[in-house]
Amino acid sequence: MTEPKVFFGREEVSASEKTARVHTVFDSVASRYDVMNDFMSLGTHRVLKRMVVESAALRQGSAVLDAAGGTGDIARLVHQAVGPSGSVTCFDINNSMLQEGRNRSIDAGCMDIDFVLADAQQLPFHDTQFDAVTIGFGLRNVADQLRALSEFRRVLRPGGRLVVLDFSKPINPGVRLAFGAFKWTWPLVGNVVAGSSRPYEYLVESIETHPSQAVLALMLRDCGFNDVRYDNLLGGIAALHWGTR
Amino acid sequence: MLEKKLLDILVCPETKGPLVYKTALNELWSPEAGLAYAVKDDIPVLIAADARSLSEDELKELNKS
């Protein structure tokens, strides 16, 4: 039996091949990750990540899972929102990104964020453990996204909320043209700042093949989420989706 | 050393069954999957492909306890 094909950028590869290649991409960018994010988003990624936390309907004491949390910037914002009585667990499949996240969290005084190396498609957490699951710019890199969404639902308590932030399809033709051109500068700058252009070529291609707003909303519904909604951000360059278990 | 509040929410990613924390080895053992997951720099590595298989003796030891 042959494995079903998924996109790695524009190339169609097997799911396991995509997982391996994404691994290489993030190993190579971990230390320059936030610098590049600042450039590529013109500083907006910090605001977008704040919107994730605001949309997650968190309270003091909430238990939150930050999925594919990488360098931990969403986890640290969540940590502020849930207070000392809450708990934050951050997982990523990439060890370099997670080490970077843990070191930065210690530097920021967020000592009690738990870090776990795990695969979004096969979560190592009990059912109904979390009040909210967040994932910022991570779902795009997962090979089997439906499987990951089902896992997020499994670990959410009934009534708990999933919030997904990722690139999407610009709705305005002007924004589409401008963003379409701008994003091709990323590999060039990546080459200078982070020493390699290939990870950023992958990034650009992965944005192009990622599901549209409506398709991702359908995927959430297919996985059993209720009250699925989305908001376009920056004219649809990114979108925020949320759903309730 | 892993904290209890983290251990309480973790399961084997493959079987979703319980994990036993072996403090001396700093490993999380999954009796159902027969796998030992490493803990590196206080970060549990809960990826089945990265786990080591438990030996027959180790499985026996688990059954006894």
Image: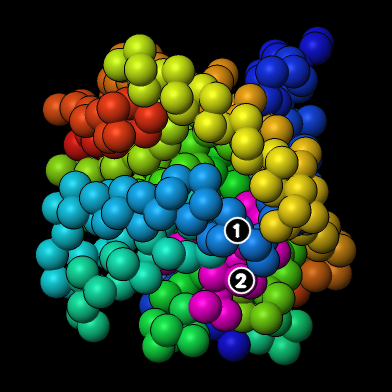
- For the point 75% across and 83% down, the residue is B25
User: How far apart are labels 2 and 1 at the CA level?
Assistant: 10 Å
Question: Where, quadrant-wise, is the N terminus of chain A in this rendering?
Answer: top right
- Classify A1 as above or below A207: above
Regarding residue A137, the answer to whether it shows in the image is yes
For badge 2, the amino acid type reads Glu
Task: Give the residues drawn in magenta, as a range.
Answer: A87-104
Q: Quadrant of residue A13?
A: top right
Question: Dot 2: what SS?
Answer: helix
Q: Is residue B30 something that shows in the picture?
A: no
Contact, CB < 8 Å: mark 2 with mark 1?
yes
Horizontal placement of A146 versus A103: left or right? left
Q: Residues within 10 Å of mark 1 (few under 14, many from 20)?
A: some
The image position of residue A205, as x and y in percent, is 63, 25
Relative to A83, say whether A179 is above or below.
above
| Residue annotated with mark 1 | A33
Element assignment for label 1: helix
From the viewer's side, name the closer residue of A100 and A155: A100
Where residue B13 is drawn, which disc sits there? none
Residue at 36% x, 23% y is A175
Tell me the chain of label 2: A
Q: Position of residue A116 (x, y in %)?
A: 55, 65
Where is residue A110? Give x, y as percent. Answer: 39, 82
x and y percentages locating residue B8 in the rendered image: 42, 71
Which residue lies under the disc numbered 2? A100
- Neighbor class of circle 2 (other Cα within 10 Å; few <14, some 14-19, many 20+) is some
Q: Earlier in the sequence, mark 2 or mark 1?
A: 1
Instruction: Determine whether, in the image, residue A245 is placed left or right of residue B26.
Output: left
- Let me know if residue A93 is in the magenta part: yes
Foreground residue among A135 and B52: A135
